[in-house]
Image: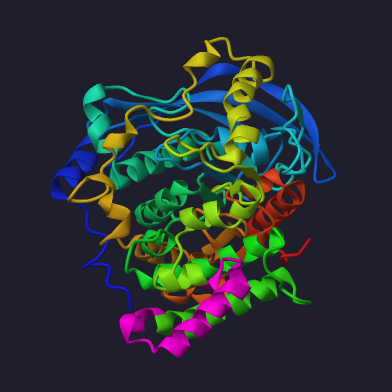
Amino acid sequence: MIDLTKRHLIGAATAAMAMAGHGASPALAQSSVHPRQRRSGVFNGQAIDYTAGLEETVVTDSQGAPFARFVCASYVREGGDPAQRPVIFAFNGGPSAASATLHMLALGPKRIELEQNPAAPAFSPPRLVDNPETVLDVADIVLVDPPETGFTRLMSEADRAGIYSVEGDARVVADFIQTWTRTNGREASPKYVIGESYGTIRAAIMAGQLAETLPLDGVFLFGQAVNMIETSQRVDNMIAYATNLPALAAIAVYHGKADKGRRSMNRFIDDVYAWGMTDYLTALVQGQALPQARRRAIAAELERLTGIGAAYYLAGDLTISKVAFASELLADRGQRLGIYDARYVGPAAVPGARPQDPFATKVSDSILPMMQTYLRQDLGVTRDPADYRPMAPDVSSWTWNTTGGIGGPFSEYDYPARIVAAFKANPRFRLMIGTGIYDLTTTVGPAQYLVAQSDYPADRVIQRRYEGGHMAYTNRSALTAFTGDIRSFVTGTAFVDV
């Protein structure tokens, strides 16, 4: 059993700062930054009338003083029953990033049209198109920009240190959700959170925090980083090499460097995971005690699965990092893989130069300018769109734990344990975990390992995989699957593979 009293500890200074600043009883304050506009659209084949707006929601501290001014986009169906109509609160990662990626590529009523062939040049100029895939047919959507991102701002610079922490960040976003819910009279509505990348850590912490005051009905961890110690690789952390192996194998198959035979990709991934967590992991933990014949046999199997030569594995204690894999797999072609989506390739890195991620140059770089265009042209924002921040400034000062710095996610934090309280607080609460199979950051194996090692009720956990990378919904078929899964998740209907 997971011991909640001994784990997920935060430094006393960080905890005190977070709790002193806010989080006790947020007062209710909301106004429209830009008038809500009535719109209509066709989503999942249904004609929907809805309102779209960019609203200001002020969260106050325990003394009632304004603490943070959230400015977030929301899309609300007209005529919906507040007691039945779900609300989805969605945010991206970072830390700490605005919600523009989910907004402009997946969940908003408009999306950036992307070239679907990873090998082809990006559309120039990029363009916005209707997004019939979004889930307004079944749920209202609030795109959350955390403090100091987007147009959201802290009311006092002195509060920044507390917010730039795992616990403080989650608390203020949880307070926003409570404030928005009460202000809009949505207490009875089913409430769901979608967190992506670092946002999955925020979602896990929030789920535990809100269990005490406003229990959620579900959390969707997309590109999950909750068990960071397995997701990220450190020297001698053998479990991380084993859990990440299925992603390397799937990517090798995509680029013609490995063969899955007649198996489906899901079956192939499961088979690699099973071998990785048994034969491979056993060999890794034996280290230098592993007999040479067995070492050569393991290296040969790794070559077959990942397309990286056995000699490389023999020289590297049977391991390869995800970053090294990105450089090595297509080195014979003078190419390197994208870390965020390994379907994308670019020229091999030039010694001494910082490599450019090919996915970023073809996809990510268009998000901010298109978000600014959308704010001005579609939402009627009159303030300078250049004020919209894609990232909070100075996040290098983010505090992870008592030691500060980057150590936190890789050491004693037990983020998965925080979700246990959400299961206990609401018997209807469910957890969904989705992963892009070509993602080299938050990979498929650690997601499977997270569930295997948790105390979560098995019948209330759903795992899904998508044909794409870290932001798998950039692949149109994955977008259909992603939004289809959200519909099934919030309506309780059967999940369908597409």
- Residue under the point 32% across and 69% down: 236
Quarter occupied by residue 270: bottom right
Q: Nearer the viewer, residue 232 or 219?
A: 232
Q: Is residue 85 shown above or below 461?
A: above
Q: How was this image coloured?
A: rainbow
Residue occupying image coordinates x 52% and y 24%: 55
Where residue 373 appears, x then y in whole percent? Answer: 64, 18
Point 35% across, 65% down: residue: 417
Outermost residue on the left side: it is 12
Q: Is residue 30 left or right of residue 467?
A: left
Q: Assign the N terminus to one quadrant of the image.
A: bottom left
Give the residue at x 34% y 41%: 169
Which quarter of the image is occupied by the C terminus? bottom right
Q: Position of residue 329 (x, y in %)?
A: 59, 58
**Residue 243 visible in the displayed image:** no
Q: Is residue 304 magenta?
A: yes
Identify the main secondary structure in magenta: helix
Residue numbers of the magenta segment: 284-310
User: Is residue 172 one of those drawn in magenta?
Assistant: no
300 vs 191, nearest the viewer = 300
